[in-house]
Image (cartoon, rainbow, N blue to C red):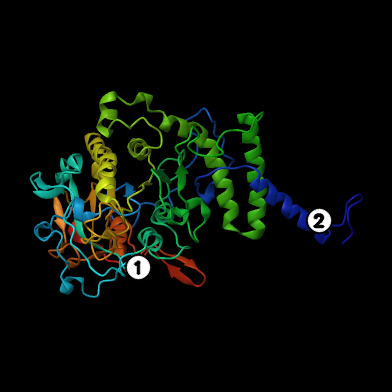
Amino acid sequence: MKRPPGSVERTPLMEFLDRERRSFLLRACCGLGGLAAAELLGSKPVRASATSSKPPVRPNLGTLGTGQFPARAKRVIYIHTLGAYSCVDLFDYKPALIKMNAQPMPASVLGAERLSVMSSGQSSFTIAGPLAPFRQHGQSGVWVSDLLPHIAGIVDDLCFVRSMYSEQVNHDPASKLLHTGFQLTGRPSAGAWVSYALGSDNSDFPSFVVMNSGHANGVPQDPAIWGPGFLPSQYQGVEFRSSKEPVLYLENIGGVTSPERRALLDSIAALSRLDYASQHDPEILSRISQYEMAYRMQHSIPEVADLSTEPKSVLDMYGPEATQSGTYAHNCIIARRLAERGVKFITLYPMDWDHHFLISTLLPPQCKMIDQPTAGLIRDLKQRGMLEDTLVVFGGEFGRTPFAQGLLSDPKWGRDHHGGNFTWFLAGGGTKAGYTHGETDDFNYTVVKDKVETYDLNATLLYLLGIDHLSLTYRYQGRDFRLTDVHGQVVKQLIA
C-alpha cells in the first residue's frame, strides 16, 4: 500500500523504540497500592485531587465481590510475633512442668518428634518450667501467665487455639508456610489472596498493609511473606514505615505540582491502555493502578498517620509508646485507624521473639511491649462496635520447647523451636469468645486433641471473610493454586 506523502516507513527498530519508550514512561512514576483493572480500560481518567479525601473512583470489589458465604468478618488484623514466642511460658499451663522442673524429659514423651538442629545434638533435655506464675482469669477461667496481665484481662473476648501444629521447625519456611501455604518463596500471601478476592472498601487506601516493629535479630523477614507471588503485583502488601514518610515515593518530585502530576498520570494511562490492548500483560494494569493509588494516598496516608485527633483516653489504652512512631503500640493504633477506613488486611510484625538464649532476661520485656497494646487494640475495637466484624489473630510461626536449650544451670539457657504444638488466639470477626480449642500433653510437647494445622487456620480465616478456600484459586503454569494448597479444613468449633 502506498504511504501518504511525508510519512516514514515503520522499521522494526522504530517499533522496538516505541515499546521501550512506553516501558520507560510506565517506570517513570513511582507508587504503591491496588485498583481495579476496569478503571484503566474503557473508563474515563480518574480526576483525583490530592486535597480531596473522597476522589470519584469506583471501589475495587475484587474477583468475588462479597464472597461465597455470608461474611462474619469484613477485615483482618493479623499479628505475627516473628521469631515465635514460648507458649510454655505464656498460655499453656502445665503443672507437670513445674513439678518436674530441672528433671530430664521422659524419653517416651520426646518420641520421634522432629527437633531443630540447634538442640538435636544435646545429650540431655532438661525440663524448664514457666518463667512466671500462671493464674485463671475471667468467666472462662483461662490460664494466662503473669507476664501478660492486660491480655489476661480480656480472655473472655478471646478464642484460644492450643493445638496449633506446623511441620516446619525453621523460621523462614515456617513463616512462608503460615502466610502463603507453602514453605518456599513464590506463592501469594494470605493478604494478597484476600485483596484479589474481595478488593478494597476504600479506594484511597491499599487493601493490604504491613507494619513492622522491633528488630529481626537474625530471623529472616522476607517480603515474600506479604508478597503477591504469581498474582498481579497490585495485590502485594504495602509496607508502612516508621520514618517521617510512612510510604515511600508518594510526594511529588521537587518542582512538580499536583496538576502536573495528574496530567502525567493521565498521559501514562492513555499509553498504557494502548500497550495493554496489544500485549495483554496484566502487569501493565498493575503498574498504572499503583501510580493512581499513590496519587490518592498523598492525602489519605498523612491523615491516617496523624494521631492528634485521638483522645488521650484512647491513646492511654494502647500504653505509653502509642505516639512513638515505629513501636508496636503505635502500629496497633494505626491498624485500628486503617481498619476504620476500610483496609481489608493489616499485618503487624512485632519482632525479636527468637529466644534461644537468655529467655529469662529477654522474654519479660518483650511481653510488656506487646501486652497492653494488644489488649488495648481489642478493647478499642470493641468499644467502637468494630470487633464483631473485625477478625484479630495473634501468634507465631511455631512454638518453643518445654526443655532447655543448653544447660538449665547456665543463666544463658533458652528454648529451641518446636512445631509440635503452639498456641494462637483469635478475637472478634465471628469467632467464639471465651472458648479454648484443643489440648496438648502434660509436657506441652504434643497435640493430643483437635490438631489445627496452619492450613486449617487459613481456611478458617477465609471462611470468616465469606470465602470458600477450595474455590479461591488462580491458574498459573497450567494448574490451579490456592492459599491452602491441597490441604485445609475450616475449624467450625472456633466460629460463634
User: Is 247 situated left or right of 13 in this image?
Assistant: left
List x then y, in percent, for residue 95.
9, 57
Q: CA distance from mark 2 to mark 1?
A: 59 Å
Residue 480: tell me if it is visible: yes
Mark 2, mark 1: which one is toward the viewer?
Answer: 1
Give the total of numbered labels.
2
Whichever of callouts 2 and 1 sits on the residue coming sooner in the sequence is 2
Say whether marks 2 and 1 touch (CB < 8 Å).
no
User: Is 238 situated left or right of 323 in this image?
Assistant: right
Q: Quadrant of residue 459?
A: bottom left
Q: Which mark is residue 117?
A: 1
The vertical placement of 152 against 435, above or below, is above
Residue 390: tell me if it is visible: no
Q: Which residue occupies 35% across, 55% down?
A: 67
* Mark 2 element type: helix
Residue, disc 2: 14
Viewer-closest of 104 and 288: 104
Viewer-closest of 253 and 328: 328
Name the residue type under label 2: Met
Q: Which residue occupies 52% across, 54% down?
A: 233
List x then y, in percent, for residue 190.
38, 56
Q: Which residue occupies 47% across, 53% down?
A: 223
Q: Which mark is residue 88?
A: none
Residue at the far front: name it.
409
Q: Quadrant of residue 155?
A: top left
User: Is 459 situated left or right of 139 in this image?
Assistant: right
User: Is 480 situated left or right of 137 in this image?
Assistant: right
